[in-house]
Image: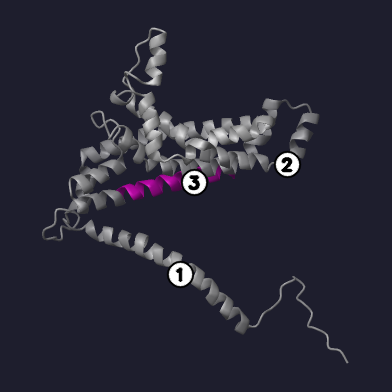
Amino acid sequence: MTTRAPAAPPDGRTDLPDVRRRPAARTGLWFVLPFLAFYLVFLLWPAIVGFGYTFTDRSLAGGPTSFVGLENWAESLTDPAMWESLWNTLVFTVLSVPLMVALALALALLTDHARKLGWFLRFGFFAPFVLPVAVMTLIWGWMYNPSLGLFNGMLGRIGVEGPEWLFGEGTAMVSVVVATAWWQVGFNYLLYLAAMQSIPGDVYEAAAIDGAGAWQRIGRITLPLLARTTALIAVLQLIGSLRVFEQIYLMTSGGPNFATRTAIQYIYDSGFVGLRIGLASSMAYVFMVIVIAASVAQFRLFSRKEA
């Protein structure tokens, strides 16, 4: 006499006893614990400690620390230099976000249509993204050099005197934006290219049969289907542009005349140059609230457009 195995549920799942589920859950917990430990020690705990510093006059120079209440917060909100650095950050964001979104889209469209050169274009457009920031600033610092640089050398050949790219108040920010776009656009380009290649080819074939030209297919098929990818790239680029620090610090050090000093650099100067950790911590939290508010507002804007 043979016994039949119990039939599986209609949905295809097998109900395991709780005794067999518990070891699996414990095994998964062991894989999560290392990340959780690093998260608590190196992110959550410093954030809590830093928030506590905002209510003190703690200094890197040492000495006794006393409770000052909301003085650091009030100084952060009324400091003209802080608002100037926030304005510089806004200028960089307004210049860089549309440029890097539009440029990434254009490069992805070019790669998607030039299939024979696809591997070469992918390598060429994405390669700068893997460069360290120090290498990128060194390359562009040479090209922006007023006397020996590539750009002024080319302008000099046609009889035009080139500007002092990184040393002029009117050109420094634009110069940093261009260098940043060359360096960082590869990531956005890769996201766009992956989204384009996931669009079924049948859609384009049907549109071509109906008489739609290349530009019509891009405007009526490609761009609408890339709406979610565009929203994702725009939000990520907004956050990245608001948090700009390394390339500006290495290329201009916030100059000339603080024309390119951004919010994070001013926070850095207040904490590690001015040695006022309490004030710098309060500025960091004020800036964090601004970044979160801007990101949420942009995300809701794109969500409404998509709806």
Where's the C terminus, which quadrant? top right
Q: Indicate the position of residue 194 as horizontal and vertical percent values.
A: 62, 42
SS at mark 3 in the image: helix
Disc 2 target residue: 200
Which mark sits nearer the N-terminus, 3 or 1?
1
Q: Nearer the viewer, mark 3 or mark 1?
A: 1
Q: Indicate the position of residue 51 as horizontal and vertical percent values.
A: 27, 58
Q: From the viewer's side, name the closer residue of 249 and 68.
A: 249
Amino acid bearing label 2? Pro
Range of the magenta residues? 286-307
- Position of residue 283 in the picture relative to residue 15 (left or right): left
SS at mark 2 in the image: loop
Q: Residue at x 21, y 52 (%)?
A: 277
Q: How many marks?
A: 3
Disc 3 target residue: 299
Disc 1 target residue: 33
Q: Indicate the position of residue 90 as horizontal and vertical percent values.
A: 36, 36
Residue at the far top in the pictured view: 159
Classify 10 Å Cα crowding around label 2: few (below 14), some (14-19), many (20 and above): few
SS at mark 1 in the image: helix
Q: Residue at x 63, y 35 (%)?
A: 119
Q: Quadrant of residue 36?
A: bottom left
- Give me the C-alpha separation between circle 3 and circle 2: 27 Å
- Position of residue 112 in the picture relative to residue 57 (left or right): right
Residue at the far bottom in the pictured view: 1
Where's the N terminus, which quadrant? bottom right
Which mark sits nearer the N-terminus, 2 or 1?
1
Q: From the viewer's side, name the closer residue of 119 and 241.
A: 119
